[in-house]
């Protein structure tokens, strides 16, 4: 025992030290970061963000220098807060709050106190900053907008939040990155790579030279410029037409899938989200939950497409061989199915074959075609799924894979959808239960972007490229291969001509005959979509959405367009007019029909939008 | 000494461990002291070069120690002890003040710290005294004399002031225990230490209450037995509380503020990393940043930035931790444990009591240094300024430990003749 005591103590000590060292060096990794931060100062050099041009080479977005007042909390020394707040035009409470936030993030890493000072403010401040130890000014580059439109396309840049910093080690507190739109989608191309210098410090926080002789230092790499497929002039015109209306316009070049215009209304001036007023403005936009200016209706709005969908019903009917272009269908004020149920139709001559059916938008005709398509197969399940596969080949029913970061999949119902609704196999269901799909109501939902895509596929007679907004990246000179790959629809080429002839007749004598543009052969289709909302939990029907799709010219189409005006009533009332103006603007460059133009520019639907919130009973479809 | 036979008899395991530790130590001193002012490797102003000179000279010293007859050490131990005490006393007149402590003699550009040599002298004297046929360590009279031998150098060192070096003399309780000192002394020491720490940690009031409650419980449990007298319990309790109150008094009125601070940090009462806990905190950061394999030799950012004070001396282990990581640190810990175990093994196989006591003293001193120093550097113990044997920068320290160890090797080599 006497021999062993010291021996045992030595061994216990060895084991305790091994445990302690394991804890410090291996288990608790917080020391590893702490160390990098207190012995090494890191200085960042932020490169210029890439410029953004429109398809005609017009500069949309450039940069302006901006200056952030940054703080490293552990380097702070007592200072005259009153004078400092006066200098930065901030209240003492705000200063205390931002210092607390900075300390909570990290006492050793810089955090912004006041972001985005202008050059004039910087010039004034820079002489005085040396008095305040722990504060310094970081130069960054901020967006300078040459235009006051396209905010939904461009997106905006903002400070990285904690979540992003945790996920992506490239970003630090105060770093800017693209949120929404092109800025987000092409963030890595636009931002470039920031340069970094490591400086070894001693315990007095003095810099004693470059760390490892600058072996790890890098120089900043400028962001690449990008060119968008957007036509700046068309985009601006579209936004002007949509003032005081809600909805969207999206226009493609059918031959390439390039997005010519992507208008979401209401919109805002992108310059609002730059500079010291940024957060105030953003809050204002964010909390406008009624008109939702930050909600991109073109990409995120899912609407019943209404009558334009009939063109697809016709194409599928032809492909499935359940109807030909000659057969006529009687319409006696609607389509009758089941026990005395009727899907109503408006007054037109009858019976009609396909071309006239499209031009007159006859509900009975398309219900017939749709029902035959479904009933061609032994079970309605098989029928629906076949019908669905055709629609999916037009890029519907899923995220489309375009190069913008927001979107919705829309909805094309499948057999599973109806099995669930009708509790199959306990209860059975048949084609008539789904009959509203024939005319683009029912379970079908599309985003305006999906509507323009099927329009482009029809214009191309059976194929499309994925819609995209990137035209060129300077220095790379290619675009992602996803956008140069042709997608074929399941409909044979010869079936498109009769449908296109019908769409052409819509302008010749049909529902949009008063919207002809002299000298341009336009094909289009009106739509009037029923819709409902909930106000204070009460379901109520609102004035129909005004929908329109079109492409022009009929042969060798240059533009395909979808227009959606919320609660605009019938299709040609707002959407059709806007579409015809946009087509004329794009193809001819100027507008011959000034009366029509000024009617749209001055027209407002704000009264209509206020109705459900007025608290009083109101009438729709006036 | 017959060179050929004796040469083989030297315990080569210990010698190899010694050179391994000295070598690794120098490599780390080089890294810790490296700065941009060095113009050439052979620059006598550079700490690492000075240490290299000391290492070379200690080889000469080793040859000397091993060349001397083993009997010399026992025969002259009293004289060596007296000379050592005299050198400590002489500091009060001729001493040179470095960093607030008058612990050095100045010899040209070098300084010598006699307290580093006093350990070996005390170990020899204690061995001689206990090894004497007439000494019985179980008798109180002899225990008292042995304690005086140990306490004298410590008492001379404390007022320099160098409480860290004085603390080392606690180690001598282990050889005394090995030779028959009653276990109660160890227990008592441990008990008083625990009372001391808990008084600081929980305050006088709570500890007093605790003492009263525990004494009362033991009393009520034992009172039915014969011989149980209440006044004995009251007496013991009063002694304990007297101790507690005196600890409180000493801590608040005799200790200097820096001593109080050091205890408070380790007890978790204060944790201001910029102020008084700075040393330990920086040392933990440096060690912790090493990870599994460290940042590589001379690549430690904390070492380069001189964040850890006293890094070449007392905190040299933090350089090992930062630059060599967990694996390197473990190599050093294992080398030390191996060396101490080997020394204890050598001590046990000595046939004379003198050699055994001496060997045990060597093991105990090395252990105490190892325990206190690495405990401090890794933040387990309060900051007590004592060096890591063979590692820390300093000629006196290196020579002191070299002499301590190699006298044992010399004694061991003559073991069989000596019986």
Image (cartoon, coloured by chain):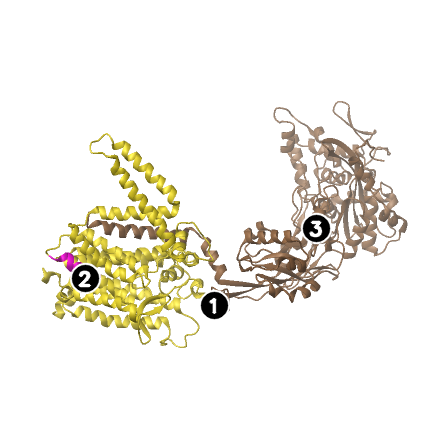
How packed mark 1 is, by other alpha carbons closer than 10 Å (few <14, some 14-19, many 20 or more), is few
The residue pinned by badge 1 equals A212
Left or right? Give the position of A121 relative to B84. right
**Quadrant of residue B412 in the image?**
bottom left
Q: Position of residue B109 (x, y in %)?
A: 33, 75
Chain identity of mark 1: A
Residue B1 bears which disc, if any? none
Q: Do the residues labelled 1 and 3 touch (CB within 8 Å)?
A: no
Report which colour depicts chain B.
yellow
Q: Position of residue A415 (x, y in %)?
A: 64, 33
Q: Where is residue A553 in the image (x, y as percent from the top left)?
A: 81, 51
Report which colour depicts chain A.
brown
- Tell me what residue is drawn at x 64 percent, y 33 percent: A417
The residue pinned by badge 3 equals A280
Q: Is residue B126 magenta?
A: yes
Q: Are marks 1 and 2 in contact (CB under 8 Å)?
A: no
**Quadrant of residue A174 in the image?**
bottom right
């Amino acid at each position: 025992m006497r021999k062993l005591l010291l021996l045992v103590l030595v061994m216990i000590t060895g084991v305790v030290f091994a445990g302690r060292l394991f804890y410090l060096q291996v288990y608790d990794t917080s020391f590893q970061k702490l160390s990098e931060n207190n012995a090494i100062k890191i200085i960042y050099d932020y490169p210029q963000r890439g410029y953004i041009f429109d398809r005609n080479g017009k500069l949309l977005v450039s940069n302006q220098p901006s200056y952030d007042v940054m703080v490293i909390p552990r380097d702070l020394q007592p200072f005259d807060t009153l004078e400092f707040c006066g200098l930065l035009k901030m209240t003492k409470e705000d200063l205390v709050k931002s210092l607390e936030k900075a300390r909570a993030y990290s006492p050793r890493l810089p955090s912004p106190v006041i972001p985005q000072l202008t050059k004039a403010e910087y010039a004034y401040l820079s002489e005085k900053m040396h008095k305040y130890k722990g504060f310094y000014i970081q130069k960054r580059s901020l967006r300078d907008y040459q235009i006051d439109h396209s905010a939904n396309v461009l997106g905006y840049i903002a400070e990285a939040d904690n979540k992003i910093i945790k996920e992506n080690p490239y970003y630090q507190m105060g770093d800017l990155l693209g949120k929404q739109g092109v800025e987000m989608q092409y963030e890595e191309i636009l931002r470039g790579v920031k340069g970094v210098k490591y400086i070894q410090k001693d315990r007095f926080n003095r810099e004693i030279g470059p760390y490892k002789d600058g072996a790890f230092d890098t120089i900043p790499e400028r962001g690449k410029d990008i060119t968008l497929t957007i036509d700046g002039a068309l985009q601006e015109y579209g936004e002007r037409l949509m003032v005081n209306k809600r909805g969207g316009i999206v226009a493609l070049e059918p031959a390439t899938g390039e997005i010519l215009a992507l208008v979401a209304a209401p919109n805002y001036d992108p310059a609002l989200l730059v500079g010291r007023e940024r957060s105030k403005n953003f809050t204002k936009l964010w909390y406008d939950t009624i008109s939702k200016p930050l909600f991109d209706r073109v990409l995120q709005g899912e609407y019943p497409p209404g009558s334009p969908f009939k063109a697809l019903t016709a194409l599928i009917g032809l492909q499935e061989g359940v109807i030909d272009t000659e057969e006529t269908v009687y319409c006696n004020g609607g389509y009758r199915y089941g026990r005395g149920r009727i899907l109503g139709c408006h007054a037109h001559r009858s019976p009609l074959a396909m071309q006239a059916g499209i031009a007159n938008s006859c509900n009975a005709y398309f219900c017939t075609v749709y029902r035959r398509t479904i009933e061609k197969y032994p079970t309605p399940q098989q029928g629906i799924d076949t019908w669905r596969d055709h629609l999916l080949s037009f890029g519907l029913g899923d995220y489309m894979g375009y190069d913008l970061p927001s979107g919705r999949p829309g909805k094309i119902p499948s057999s599973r959808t109806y099995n669930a609704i009708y509790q199959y196999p306990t209860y059975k269901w048949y084609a008539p239960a789904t009959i509203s799909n024939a005319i683009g109501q029912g379970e079908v939902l599309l985003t305006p972007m999906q509507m323009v895509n099927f329009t482009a596929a029809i214009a191309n007679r059976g194929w499309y490229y994925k819609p995209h907004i990137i035209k060129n990246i300077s220095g790379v000179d290619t675009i992602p291969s996803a956008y140069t790959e042709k997608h074929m629809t399941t409909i044979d080429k010869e079936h498109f001509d009769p449908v296109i002839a019908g769409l052409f007749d819509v302008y010749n004598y049909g529902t949009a005959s008063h919207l002809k543009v002299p000298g341009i052969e336009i094909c289009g289709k009106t739509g009037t979509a029923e819709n409902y909302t909930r106000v204070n939990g009460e379901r109520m029907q609102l004035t129909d959405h005004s929908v329109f799709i079109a492409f022009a010219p009929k042969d060798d189409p240059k533009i395909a367009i979808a227009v959606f005006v919320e609660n605009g009533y019938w299709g040609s009332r707002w959407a059709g007019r806007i579409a015809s103006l946009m087509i004329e603007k794009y193809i001819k460059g100027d507008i011959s029909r000034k009366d029509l133009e000024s009617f749209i520019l001055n027209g407002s639907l704000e009264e209509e939008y206020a109705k459900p919130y007025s608290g009083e009973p109101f009438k729709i479809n006036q | 000494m017959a060179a050929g036979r004796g040469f083989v008899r030297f315990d080569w395991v210990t010698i190899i461990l010694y050179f391994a530790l000295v070598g690794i130590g120098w490599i780390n001193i080089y890294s810790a002291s490296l700065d941009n002012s060095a113009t050439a490797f052979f620059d006598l102003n550079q700490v690492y070069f000075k240490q290299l000179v000391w290492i070379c000279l200690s080889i000469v010293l080793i040859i000397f120690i091993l060349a001397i007859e083993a009997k010399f050490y026992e025969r002259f131990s009293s004289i060596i002890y007296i000379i050592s005490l005299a050198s400590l006393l002489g500091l009060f007149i001729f001493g040179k003040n470095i960093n607030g402590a008058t612990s050095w003699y100045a010899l040209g550009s070098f300084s010598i710290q006699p307290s580093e040599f006093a350990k070996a002298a005390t170990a020899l004297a204690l061995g001689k005294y206990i090894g004497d046929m007439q000494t019985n360590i179980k008798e109180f009279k002899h225990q008292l004399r042995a304690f005086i031998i140990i306490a004298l150098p410590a008492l001379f060192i404390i007022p320099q002031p160098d409480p860290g070096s004085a603390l080392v003399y606690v180690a001598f309780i282990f050889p005394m225990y090995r030779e028959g000192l009653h276990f109660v002394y160890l227990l008592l020491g441990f008990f008083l230490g625990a009372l001391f720490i808990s008084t600081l940690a929980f305050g006088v009031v709570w500890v007093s209450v605790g003492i009263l409650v525990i004494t009362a419980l033991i009393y009520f449990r034992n009172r039915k037995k014969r011989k149980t007298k209440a006044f004995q319990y009251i007496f013991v309790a009063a002694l304990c509380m007297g101790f507690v109150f005196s600890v409180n008094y000493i801590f608040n009125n005799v200790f200097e503020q820096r001593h109080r601070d050091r205890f408070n940090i380790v007890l978790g009462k204060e944790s201001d990393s910029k102020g008084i806990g700075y040393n330990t905190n920086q040392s933990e950061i440096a060690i912790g940043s090493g990870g599994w394999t460290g940042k590589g030799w001379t690549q430690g950012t904390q070492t380069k930035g001189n964040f850890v004070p006293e890094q070449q001396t007392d905190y040299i282990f933090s350089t090992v931790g930062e630059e060599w990581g967990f694996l390197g640190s473990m190599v050093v810990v294992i080398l030390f444990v191996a060396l101490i175990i080997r020394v204890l093994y050598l001590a046990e196989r000595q046939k004379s009591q003198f050699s055994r006591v001496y060997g045990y003293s060597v093991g105990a001193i090395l252990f105490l240094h190892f325990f206190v120093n690495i405990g401090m550097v890794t933040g387990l113990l309060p900051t007590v300024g004592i060096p890591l044997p063979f590692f820390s920068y300093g000629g006196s320290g290196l020579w002191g430990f070299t002499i301590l160890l190699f006298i044992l090797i010399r004694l061991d080599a003559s073991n069989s003749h000596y019986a």
